[in-house]
């Protein structure tokens, strides 16, 4: 049986369109009780959890947007090695356009 995933290819946030270069199939995990969904996707700075898929999807989008806003255009000299890696992943995997 395949593991359940949550797929995101694009979304709107704060009057901008975020488009993932390739749709990402975020692997879902569940707590032992099965009542809490969680996703970790360090390449984009995502570490989210929620009680519903809908809320989890909103949280993933919010975290991608936040990381993009904080790191994508920041000069490397102001960033740690881990933040530079995140910045490069964001710039390779996400495009943003005003709407």
Image: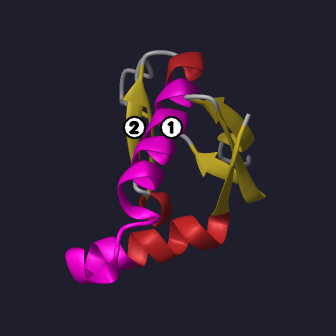
Residue located at (65% from left, 46% from top): 3
- In the displayed structure, does residue 89 sit left or right of residue 45? right
- In the displayed structure, does residue 12 sit left or right of residue 32? right
In this figure, which residue is indicated by the disc labeled 2? 48
Q: Secondary structure at mark 1?
A: helix
Split into 4 quadrants, where in the image is the C terminus?
top right
- The x, y position of residue 37, in whole percent, is 46, 29
Distance of label 2 from label 1 (alpha carbons): 6 Å
- Specify few, some or many for label 2: CA neighbours under 10 Å numbering under 14, 14-19, or 20 or more: some
- In the displayed structure, does residue 80 sit left or right of residue 8? left
For residue 77, above or below residue 99: below
Q: Main secondary structure of the magenta part?
A: helix
Asked if the residues shown at circle 2 and circle 1 are in contact, with their CB atoms under 8 angstroms apart, the answer is yes
Give whichever of 33, 81 is nearer the camera.
81
In this figure, which residue is indicated by the disc labeled 1? 60
Q: Is residue 58 visible?
A: yes
> Residue 10's image quarter?
top right
Q: Is residue 80 visible?
A: no
**Highlighted magenta segment, given as a residue range:** 56-84
- The x, y position of residue 36, in whole percent, is 40, 23
Q: How does the figure colour the protein chain or chains?
A: secondary structure
For residue 21, above or below residue 49: below
């Amino acid at each position: 049986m395949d593991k359940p995933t949550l797929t995101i290819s694009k979304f709107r946030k704060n009057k901008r369109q975020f488009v993932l270069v390739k749709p990402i199939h975020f692997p879902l995990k569940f707590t032992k009780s099965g009542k809490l969904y969680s996703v970790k996707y360090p390449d984009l700075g995502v570490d989210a959890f929620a009680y519903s898929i809908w809320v989890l999807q909103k949280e993933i989008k919010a975290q991608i947007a936040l990381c993009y806003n904080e790191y994508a255009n920041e000069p490397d000299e102001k960033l740690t090695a881990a933040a530079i890696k995140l910045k490069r992943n964001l710039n390779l995997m996400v495009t943003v356009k005003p709407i």
